[in-house]
Image (tube, helix red, strand yellow):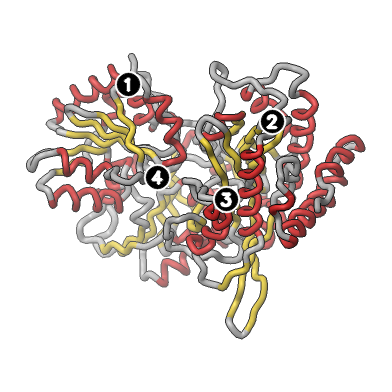
């Protein structure tokens, strides 16, 4: 059954339910960026497999909304189907709800699975649609009816974080959460986000590919912690540890029912951005609802001194794997036939040899030439491009280790590079360095830092559509809030201990894509009469390719930063390398200018 057949089946089901339109979200009931296959209905129906997108189907139209990271990918994957691409964020392109208000007459009904929409989204959608006399239903379950051969919910076992990596114990973390609950005068705290639960319980799993999390809910009260999880995921040893710490385990599917049984006098705290609409509607009407940002989010975003040291160590080991990978790549290109897929598999094999390796932290992006203009491109066996000893190869990858999560992008010159590619490469590097050198006052948001990475590009009339930086977890999700460095005004300030990427880029359709990415730790740089000032200290340890740099475009300060960084890289990695690898690294880290 192809995409068009699936859309027809969806419309038939919509008619049975009395729906005039249907919205199919990407999320699972926990608001995960990367859901398990069990929840990938949008991908199943549309054929588009990017990590962000919304499918809207009416009786006469099917449209997919996605952002600039996926325009090129979506165009390819939707070609020849009945699903039209709507480029979210482009001038003149309404958002899905606005589109439906233009299209549907008063009295129409729109359906969406309430498990896949947050409380905040539900309220926004409902309010907007009702202004136009349109009803919203969230009591539908399309996946169970339409998802043929739907994968089961993952049942992999969870494991406990080794005490030598955990930093704070479960009891200490719960105590911190209860302090925040007390400030909110909350008696119950509902937690749906998988990474929040993994952090709070000091457990990890493999339910979601690349993210070491497991499907569960939690309710923290003033005296108890309730974990809702498939009990088959818990080994005897894990169950004993949870019992010793006073954590009460219940079945995953009992969560919604138990929400309905909360005491009438409960003051229930939850994050409307991270709790789903179905769970929210299950709460007793008598309960007082106390809403605000996740209480766990801020705690886990600011890494402890212990965690930062472990993260540094993980990045050094990751850098050793990358030295071996890039050295192999340079020795192989032009001598043996290599495709992007070959390179991706080899990169994973080098990482897998590193102590403490669990998995990659996301699907390797190995993109040669024009493919690199597709921001989240991932090669396939059938469509992988063959590498030649010329042009640029973009490699964005990372690893999950017991003591940290890595994410690094390097754009590598495989041979001769055009003048335009060198210009763009240098502009990206200047943007990367500008952010890496930034010093900023306490209270600064990511939107205020974002322009630093773009200012040199803007002088040349160049820009990029994605954000400049995202938070990263500690052996957790490679994308973690609350901080974000982008054009969007996110209500979160940069704070010491936050692990954040620095990754400007330039993409030219049909020609090339360039991105340079390191991870940074926010630190306190100085205190003056004007207050506290912070900076971003680079923690990724691997050289930046010098071959495409137009050195004359760099300032003395930028040259010094690059040379100092390369000296740090050499000092960190050389003691762990073989003599021939050290020589390769020495050459890669030689100063410029």
Residue at the right extreme of this rendering: 579
Position of 331 compared to 78: left or right? right
Position of 161 compared to 229: left or right? right
Q: How far across and down, in percent of the image, does residue 106 sit?
A: 8, 43
Identify the secondary structure beneath mark 1: loop
Q: How far across and down, in percent of the image, does residue 265 sit?
A: 26, 64
Residue 469 appears in view:
no
Identify the secondary structure beneath mark 2: helix
Q: For residue 347, which numbered disc appears in the image? A: 2
Counting residues from the start of the chain, the first of labels 4 and 3 encountered is 4
The residue pinned by badge 3 equals: 473
Residue 283 position (above or below residue 321): below
- Disc 4 and disc 3: Cα gap in Å? 16 Å
Given residues 372 and 61, the one toward you in this image is 372
Q: For residue 31, which numbered disc appears in the image? A: 4
The residue pinned by badge 1 equals: 81
Q: Nearer the viewer, mark 1 or mark 4?
A: 1
Q: Nearer the viewer, mark 2 or mark 1?
A: 1
Counting residues from the start of the chain, the first of labels 3 and 1 encountered is 1
Write the residue at 66% across / 39% down.
419
């Amino acid at each position: 059954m192809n995409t068009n057949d699936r859309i027809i089946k969806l419309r038939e089901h919509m008619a049975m339910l009395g729906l005039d339109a249907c919205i199919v979200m990407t999320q699972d009931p926990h608001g995960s960026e990367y859901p398990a296959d069990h929840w990938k209905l949008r991908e199943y129906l549309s054929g588009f497999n990017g990590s962000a997108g919304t499918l809207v189907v009416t009786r006469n139209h099917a449209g997919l909304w996605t952002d600039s990271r996926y325009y090129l990918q979506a165009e390819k994957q939707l070609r020849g189907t009945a699903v039209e691409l709507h480029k979210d964020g482009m001038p003149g392109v309404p958002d899905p709800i606005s589109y439906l208000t233009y299209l549907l007459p008063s009295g129409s009904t729109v359906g969406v699975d309430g498990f896949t929409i947050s409380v905040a989204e539900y309220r926004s959608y409902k309010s907007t649609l009702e202004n136009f006399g349109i009803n919203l239903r969230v009591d539908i379950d399309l996946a169970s009816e339409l998802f043929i051969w739907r994968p089961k919910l993952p049942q992999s076992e969870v494991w406990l974080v080794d005490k030598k990596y955990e930093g704070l114990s479960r009891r200490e973390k719960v105590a911190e959460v209860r302090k925040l609950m007390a400030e909110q005068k909350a008696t119950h705290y509902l937690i749906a986000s998988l990474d929040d639960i993994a952090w709070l319980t000091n457990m990890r799993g493999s339910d979601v590919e690349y993210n070491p999390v497991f499907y569960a809910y939690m309710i923290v009260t003033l005296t108890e912690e309730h974990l809702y999880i498939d009990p088959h995921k818990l080994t005897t040893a894990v169950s004993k540890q949870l019992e010793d710490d006073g954590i009460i385990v219940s079945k995953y599917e009992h969560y919604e029912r138990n929400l309905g049984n909360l005491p009438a006098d409960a003051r229930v705290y939850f994050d409307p951005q991270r709790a789903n609409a179905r769970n929210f509607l299950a709460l007793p009407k008598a309960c007082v609802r106390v809403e605000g940002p996740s209480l766990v989010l801020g705690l886990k975003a600011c890494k402890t001194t212990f965690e930062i040291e472990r993260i540094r160590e993980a990045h050094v080991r990751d850098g050793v794997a990358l030295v071996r990978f890039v050295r192999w790549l340079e020795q192989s290109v032009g001598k043996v036939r290599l495709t992007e897929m070959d390179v991706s598999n080899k990169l994973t094999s080098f990482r897998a040899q590193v102590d403490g390796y669990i998995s990659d932290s996301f699907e390797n992006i190995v993109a040669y030439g024009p493919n690199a203009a597709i921001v989240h491109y991932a090669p396939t066996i059938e469509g992988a491009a063959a590498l030649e000893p010329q042009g640029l190869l973009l490699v964005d990858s990372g690893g999950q280790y017991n003591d940290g999560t890595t994410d690094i992008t390097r754009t590598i010159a495989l041979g001769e590079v055009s003048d335009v590619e060198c210009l763009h490469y240098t502009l990206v590097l200047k943007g990367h360095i500008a952010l890496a050198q930034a010093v900023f006052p306490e209270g600064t948001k990511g939107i205020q830092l974002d322009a630093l990475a773009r200012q040199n590009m803007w002088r040349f009339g160049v820009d990029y559509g994605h954000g400049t930086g995202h938070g990263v977890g500690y052996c957790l999700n490679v994308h973690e809030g609350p901080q974000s460095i982008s054009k969007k005004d996110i209500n979160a300030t940069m704070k010491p201990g936050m692990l954040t990427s620095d990754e400007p880029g330039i993409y030219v359709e049909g020609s090339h894509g360039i991105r340079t990415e390191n991870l940074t730790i926010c630190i306190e740089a100085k205190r003056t009469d004007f207050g506290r000032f912070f900076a971003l200290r680079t923690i990724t340890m691997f050289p930046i390719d010098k071959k495409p740099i137009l050195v004359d475009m760099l300032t003395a300060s930028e040259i010094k930063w690059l040379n100092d960084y390369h000296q740090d890289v050499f000092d960190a990695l050389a003691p762990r390398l073989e003599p021939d690898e050290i020589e390769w690294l020495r050459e890669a880290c030689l100063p410029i200018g």
